[in-house]
């Protein structure tokens, strides 16, 4: 299947700093990518939809000024957690849709980024 | 977005066949059904996807009845490494916002020796 990568795989930062997470589709182009957040022993929660060349669409309750999303190319979306606080510590996962599947488009997920805010 | 319901947990033994059923009563005409596997601290991994009847690949089978209000993921001869959380997602994959899926609670499968 298609490959989606994330960088970094884990990051530790001090409270008040900003952290940028990259999501790349390695072998296909993705006009739309998605960002999820997952807390321990919980399911994935969709945060926002990242659209290439336009503004991201945020889910209800997600602060757009805190979680900045940029989708500058068809293979790269970035999520910047601004002024991070300990409650932002979580597992962040991106996904992208590959339209080439013979059985229909398939959504592939990145390996996730573990963010720990001290 | 169709809401899905799965059993919270299931136990099995190595070598057995495991069937996990997902209910999606309000599935829409254009919706596909996709199953993912997730290990701790990893992103979900695509297992199988289908629209109707039966789909089989090298790791699993997906059974979808005619009314499409449920689906069953079948894992043949599970091993300890199949211990994971399994998610069933339903959505229109061809829409521009496909992927705007709501993850349910998933099914935690525990395979015992």
Image: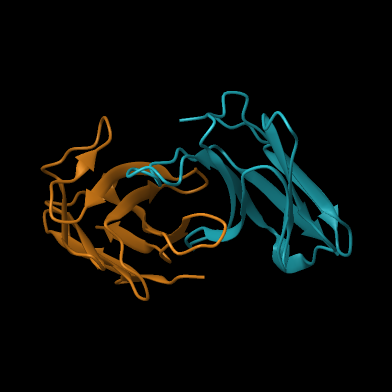
Chain colours: A orange, B cyan
Observer able to see residue A13:
no
Q: Is residue A23 visible?
A: yes
Q: How many marks?
A: 0
Could you tell me which residue is drawn at 76 percent across and 66 percent down?
B80
Q: Is residue B95 above or below residue B17?
A: above
The outermost residue toward the top is B26
**Which of the two residues, B46 or A42, is positioned nearer the viewer here?**
B46
Choose top left, top right, bottom left or bottom right for residue A33.
bottom left
Query: Whole-percent x and y of residue B85?
Result: 62, 51
Q: Using the image, determine if residue B43 lies above or below residue A49.
A: below
Q: Residue at x 49, y 40 (%)?
A: B103
> Residue at the spot x=26%, y=57% of the render?
A31
Image-quadrant location for residue A100: bottom left
Residue B93 image offset from top left, x and y in percent: 45, 46
Residue A91 vs residue B15, the one in the foreground: B15
Rendered location of residue B70, percent (x, y): 69, 33
């Amino acid at each position: 299947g298609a490959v989606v990568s994330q960088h970094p795989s884990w990051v530790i930062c001090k409270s008040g700093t900003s952290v940028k997470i990259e999501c790349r589709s390695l072998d296909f182009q993705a006009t739309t990518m998605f960002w999820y957040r997952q807390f321990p022993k919980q399911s994935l929660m969709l945060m926002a939809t990242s659209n290439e060349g336009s503004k991201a669409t945020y889910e209800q309750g997600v602060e757009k000024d805190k979680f900045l999303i940029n989708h500058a190319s068809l293979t790269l979306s970035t999520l910047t957690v601004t002024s991070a606080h300990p409650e932002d510590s979580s597992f962040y996962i991106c996904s992208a849709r590959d339209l080439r599947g013979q059985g229909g488009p398939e959504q592939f997920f990145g390996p996730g980024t573990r963010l720990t805010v001290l | 977005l169709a809401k899905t319901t799965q059993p919270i947990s299931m136990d099995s033994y190595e070598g057995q066949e495991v069937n996990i059923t997902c209910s999606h009563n309000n599935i829409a005409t254009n919706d596909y059904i996709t199953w993912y596997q997730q290990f701790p601290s990893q992103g979900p991994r695509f297992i199988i996807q289908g629209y109707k009847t039966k789909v089989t690949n090298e790791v699993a089978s997906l059974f979808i009845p005619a009314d499409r209000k449920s689906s069953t993921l079948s894992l043949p001869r599970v091993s300890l490494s199949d211990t994971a959380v399994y998610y069933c997602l339903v959505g229109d994959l061809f829409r521009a916002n496909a992927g705007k899926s709501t993850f349910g609670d998933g099914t935690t499968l525990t395979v015992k020796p």
